[in-house]
Image: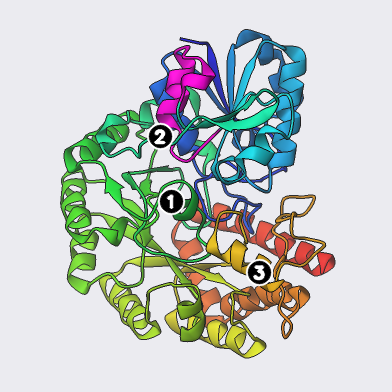
Amino acid sequence: MKKTLFLSPPTFDGYDGGAGSRYQCKREVKSFWYPTWLAQLAALVPGSKLIDAPARGLQLDALLPLASEYEFLVIYTSTPSFRNDVKVAEAFKAKNPALLIGFCGSHVAVNNEASIQASPAIDFVCDVEFDFAIKEIAEGRPLPEVLGITILKDGAPHFTGKRPVIEDMDSLPWVTPIYKEHLVTTDYYNGYMLHPYMSLYTGRGCKSHCTFCLWPQTISGHRYRTRSIPNIAAEIKWARDNFPEIKEFFFDDDTLTDNIPQVEALARELGKLGVTWSCNAKANVPYDTLKVMRENGLRLLLVGYESGNQNILNNIKKGILVTKARQFTKDCHELGILIHGTFIVGLPGETLDTIEESIRYAQELDPKTIQVSLPAAYPGTFLYNQAMENGWLAPDKADHLVDDHGVQNSVIEYPHLTSAQIFDAVDRFYKRFYFRPRKMASLFFDMCRDWQVMKRQLREGVEFFRFLWGRENAA
């Protein structure tokens, strides 16, 4: 077995590049998600090392001495961070020319030929599900014999062939022991989870076909494959017993509620364990299922509302009705389930009027917290192809999804709606939602009930205002 280092490389300060998320960028409030994809690889390679440089605040100079200690380096990359990550690979290769370096992530999966030619420091790039390809390489199998990677052969890109999709999800080892050995749980936080929290996957894939969503269109597919309930429950029990500091478990599956019987069965097992948990959900979960989830430890749902305009939801193939989302939200409020609602400003069909409609919609729904994003046209998504075909990608920003500080750029524009208008709408959306007397009072009383919450929200409030100030000065 090669001595292997798995690296989420250093990049912009506060840049959450290791997240299995739709948007890899610097957040409004400093946030870090667990590098679960890399942890899954580390679990397959005994004796390997996992380093999450951004979450630890590590810079390249602190990491380079490790180059001579390892035989194999795997870098997790993304479209916004790829140029930076290539420089990291080149620095490691300069220190140890014999070091085998591979890249994984959606960017290299959909841009495999350009990626393998980006630098001589890169020995291979991975296709979609890359878990067992990496394991085979670590075990010493020659690169040309490993399915699911692109290498250079006679100076030209060569794809070694498709690897079968993983059907038995229980064949993947647990990630939580890797977290225990290599990560610091207090490094991971965001604006709506209890702190410290822990995130992991129970399955891969998403039945929805949202045109902007990165992972189902690039890595995991639209067929939801899940681990068995006993397997998931056993890992959560192990994590509960080995991480006494963890206050909440988050299931980072694209849509945990895609499989209603599965999520109800899982909820009942989690209830027996007495843990607090949360997950991603579509705004169409039946009341009876929500009730089962709530009665068994569910605290919060992360819900992608995206827009309050039905035509826009249809344009992005959201597969949800505004009326259904309203009822779902009402049910959650009735049951005491908190919601972190996500919205996107600037999707196809957006106008100044529909932006106003979405702001009023968010105020009406009144989730506990919100995230407002710009549309991120990632290569490999339907939205990216649509934007390229229609000339919606702003020419000066098409290859720059984030700015020089890692903050998301406004890259899409329309004949009737400029990228600057879309950019400005994010600030307006946030201010109109949060700067309401009722919302401000609610947040204030939350702070008064818990000193730890007060300290955290004061810090996040400062970061949020800095974020808005920075955007206003960048506009």
**Crowding near pointer 1: few (<14 within 10 Å), some, many (20+)?**
some
Quarter assignment of residue 199 = top left
Alpha-carbon distance for marks 2 and 1? Answer: 38 Å
**Crowding near pointer 3: few (<14 within 10 Å), some, many (20+)?**
few
- Picture quarter with the N terminus: top left
Whether residues under marks 2 and 3 lie with C-beta atoms below 8 angstroms apart, the answer is: no
Of the residues under marks 2 and 3, which one precedes in the sequence?
Answer: 2
User: Which residue position holds label 1?
Assistant: 194
Callout 2: helix, strand or loop? Answer: loop
User: Which residue position holds label 2?
Assistant: 163
Residue closest to the eye, 403 or 166 = 166
Residue 131 locus on image (x, y percent):
42, 31
Q: Amino acid at mark 1?
A: Leu
Of the residues under marks 1 and 3, which one precedes in the sequence?
Answer: 1
Whether residues under marks 1 and 3 lie with C-beta atoms below 8 angstroms apart, the answer is: no
- Give the magenta range: 126-146
